[in-house]
Structures are given as C-alpha cells and as structure tokens.
C-alpha cells in the first residue's frame, strides 16, 4: 500500500505526522514488497527537518505528482494546490488543522481566484475529519464537501492526554533551555489576511506586545515563547536582550503546549488544543473589531465563549500574566463550557479512531460518524 503524506505545505507535523507515526508503530512489515510505502511532500527548506529514513519528495517537483497519482492513500491537513489526478480506488483523507472559530474558505470574505485550486482539491477528498460535533456542519458548509465527515478529535492532540505528558513537558523545557520554576508564556497568534494577501498593514510578524514592559514587570522568571502561524513564521525579527524564544519552527506544537504554563493567543484555534491541558488561556484581542468586521469574521461571539479574558492592550496583558489566578477566576465556568463544546473528543484515542477509517468497512460508512461517542459506550 502506498501512502502520501502532506502537512502545512511541506512540514513534518500535525495530524498527518501523528497518523504516520501510528501506522509505523502498529507493527506493519518493513517498507517494500510486503509492507507500506510512505512518501512525504516537502520543500527545499523543510527537507532536512524530516527524520532519517523518511522518504520525501519536493512538492513542486514532478515526482510529487507521480507519487500522488500512484498513491493508495493520501493524507493531508490542508488543501493541496497541486495539479494531479487521483487514482481510481485511492482514498484521500483530509484531516484539516483546527476548529473553525474564525470564518474559513467560502464563508470568509471572497478574493477572486483565491480558492480555485483549493476547490479542485476538495473535489478529490473522500473523508474529512471534524475535531468536535460543533465543527462538523461548519466545515462541511465552508468547503462545500458532500462526503462523509467523521467526528474523531485530532490525532495531534492525543499526546496531551498521554500518561507520558509530564515526562515530555520536562524534556521539552530542558531542550528549549527553560529553567525550573520559570513561567513559560506561549504566544501563538493567527495571521492577518490584509498583511499577507493584500500586503498592507505591516510585515505580518510584528509583535504587538510591549517587550520592555513585559520584561520589567514580570522579571527573569518568565520567558515568552513566540510561535507564529506558518504563513508568516519566516518574517519575525526579535530584538536583543529580551527573554523571548522564537519557537515557530518547532515541528510539534503539542510539545509546546505541554511545556508552556499559559497560552496567549487571539483568534487562533490553538486555544481549543491548549484547553485540553486545562491551563490558563488569555486572548490578546487588540484588533478585534477590525478582524471581526473587516478581515475575516467569526462563527462565535468570542466574548461569550472564550475560555479566558479578552485583553485589548499590552498593559492589560502584562497585568493578567502578573496575576493569572485573578485574571482567570471570573472565567472558570466559561472555560469548562468551552472544553465541553470543543474538546469533548480529545480523550487521547483520536488516532485509533482515524486509523479505523482507513479500513474497507469504514470507507463505506455514512456521511457523519461519531467515533468518540461510540467508543465511550
């Protein structure tokens, strides 16, 4: 059986990585005549980040099209904007990469031609994953997808419920050089459409946090871990002398969620993944009106559902970080409701449920499956 894997335009990451590693660990025969063949799509910049022994092809090379068209199973977490024809009998599993809190695809403001290649890819999908029941119909409608949508949770988040999560936290903090007793603040914002697609309003990687104020008021026992969206991650320039680590190139954000003590985000669905840990979430929504009314819009009212406070200035953010217990106390009930709505399938077994979809019986299943509920019974 031939597998082709793709994640975030050439990275070894996310749901495809979790599924690939699970397939490799299930005890299949070695690659060759009697075992599966795996190929990952990569770029020239990311090829060196893949583990030794993993076969890669450049996604913009003819070999990528050859691999895709010969595949029995294609697994991706984003639309493949490549020209290729899916082989008859092949299965294309689209995992996607987040709960759609903000509007996506055809529900977002239209830009002529922007979705043409993506829509051609959607037409190839056989299965689409949904991270929770709330997301299912929103994903189906946004993509115009008529095939089966499977409510499984996300394989990438299984590690957050793993018995080894404390060991992995310690190992990740040691690798990043975070001393014992230091509060690690993970800042993971989304990207802005106007800065990337319209090339206005800054570099797309400007930090709206007053780093001098953060350093002065929180001291050396705090470190800021900055993880930008992959679309703008290469644009970040950090000043010298501030306790900030750029972790945008870390392949597995789940390790960062475990290593961090608090998440600061804005409108990114990383807040859903991070909420699995039960740790504090602060929303630095400094441009909320602009993002909601002019750029993208939301499927939710953040003020009603957010798992933590909405902060509009850097000073408010630093105040909240200085006294997290006080900042989070008014939001205890809302945090619990947020987890109930968006994290109800994140039980550490999503990978098992998704791999079951790749069996012949699952491939013939109905339009929506709720594997988590069935497994719980």
Image (cartoon, rainbow, N blue to C red):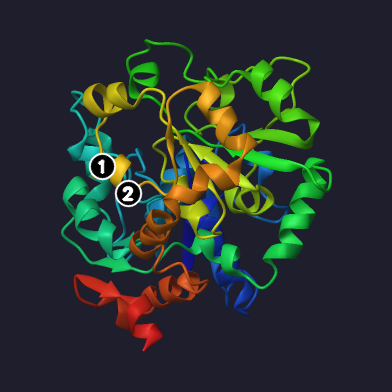
Q: Position of residue 355 (x, y in %)?
A: 45, 73
Among the 4 quarters of the image, the one containing residue 23: bottom right
Q: Nearer the viewer, residue 55 or 218?
A: 218
Asked if the residues shown at circle 2 and circle 1 are in contact, with their CB atoms under 8 angstroms apart, the answer is yes
In the picture, measured across the screen, residue 166 lies left or right of residue 227, that is right
Q: Residue at x 72, y 56 (%)?
A: 169
Crowd band around label 2 with a 10 angstrom C-alpha radius: few (<14), some (14–19), many (20+)? some
Q: SS of the residue at dot 1?
A: loop
| Relative height, residue 201 to residue 160 (above, below) | above
Residue furthest out toward the bottom: 377
Q: CA distance from mark 2 to mark 1?
A: 6 Å
Residue that label 1 marks: 301
Circle 2: element type:
helix
Q: Is residue 300 above or below residue 373?
A: above
* Residue drawn at x 60%, y 18% as measured from the top left: 210
Q: Is residue 57 visible?
A: no
Drawn side of residue 371 relative to residue 223, left or right: left
- Categorize mark 1 by other alpha carbons within 10 Å: few (<14), some (14-19), many (20+): few
Q: Is residue 312 left or right of residue 180?
A: left
Q: Quadrant of the C terminus?
A: bottom left
On the image, numbered disc 2 is attached to which residue?
A: 305
Rendered location of residue 116, percent (x, y): 22, 34
Is residue 212 visible to us here?
yes
Q: Is 263 located above or below residue 233 in the figure?
A: below
């Amino acid at each position: 059986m031939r597998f082709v894997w793709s994640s975030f335009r050439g990275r070894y990451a996310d749901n495809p990585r979790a599924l690939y590693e699970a397939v490799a660990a299930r005890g299949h025969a070695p690659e060759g005549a009697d075992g599966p063949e795996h190929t990952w799509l990569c770029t020239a910049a990311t090829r060196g980040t893949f583990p030794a022994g993993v076969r890669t092809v450049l996604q913009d090379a003819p070999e990528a099209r050859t691999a895709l068209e010969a595949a029995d199973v294609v697994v991706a977490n984003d639309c493949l904007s490549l020209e290729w024809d899916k082989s008859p009998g092949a299965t294309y599993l689209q995992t996607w990469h987040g709960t759609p809190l903000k509007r996506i695809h055809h529900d977002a403001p239209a830009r002529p031609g922007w979705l043409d290649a993506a829509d051609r890819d959607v037409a190839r999908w056989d299965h689409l994953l949904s991270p929770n029941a709330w997301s299912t119909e929103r994903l189906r409608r946004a993509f115009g997808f008529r095939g089966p949508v499977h409510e499984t949770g996300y394989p990438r988040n299984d590690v957050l419920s793993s018995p080894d999560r404390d060991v992995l936290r310690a190992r990740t903090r040691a690798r990043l050089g975070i001393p014992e007793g230091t509060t690690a603040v993970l800042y993971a914002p989304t990207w802005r459409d106007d800065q990337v697609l319209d090339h206005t309003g800054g570099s797309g990687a400007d930090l709206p946090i007053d780093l001098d104020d953060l350093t002065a008021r929180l001291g050396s026992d705090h470190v800021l871990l900055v993880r930008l969206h992959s679309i703008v991650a290469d644009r970040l320039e950090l000043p010298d002398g501030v306790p900030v680590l750029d972790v945008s190139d870390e392949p597995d954000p789940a390790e960062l969620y475990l290593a961090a003590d608090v998440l600061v985000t804005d409108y990114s669905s990383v807040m859903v993944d991070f909420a699995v840990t039960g740790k504090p979430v602060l929303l630095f929504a400094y441009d909320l009106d602009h993002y909601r009314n002019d750029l993208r819009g939301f499927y939710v009212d953040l003020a009603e559902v957010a798992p933590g406070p909405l902060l509009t200035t850097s000073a408010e953010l630093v105040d909240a970080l200085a006294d997290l217990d006080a900042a989070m106390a008014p939001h205890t009930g809302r945090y619990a409701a947020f987890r109930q709505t968006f994290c109800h399938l994140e039980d550490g077994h999503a990978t098992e449920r998704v791999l079951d979809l790749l069996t012949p019986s699952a491939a013939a299943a109905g339009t929506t499956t709720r594997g988590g509920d069935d497994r719980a019974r």
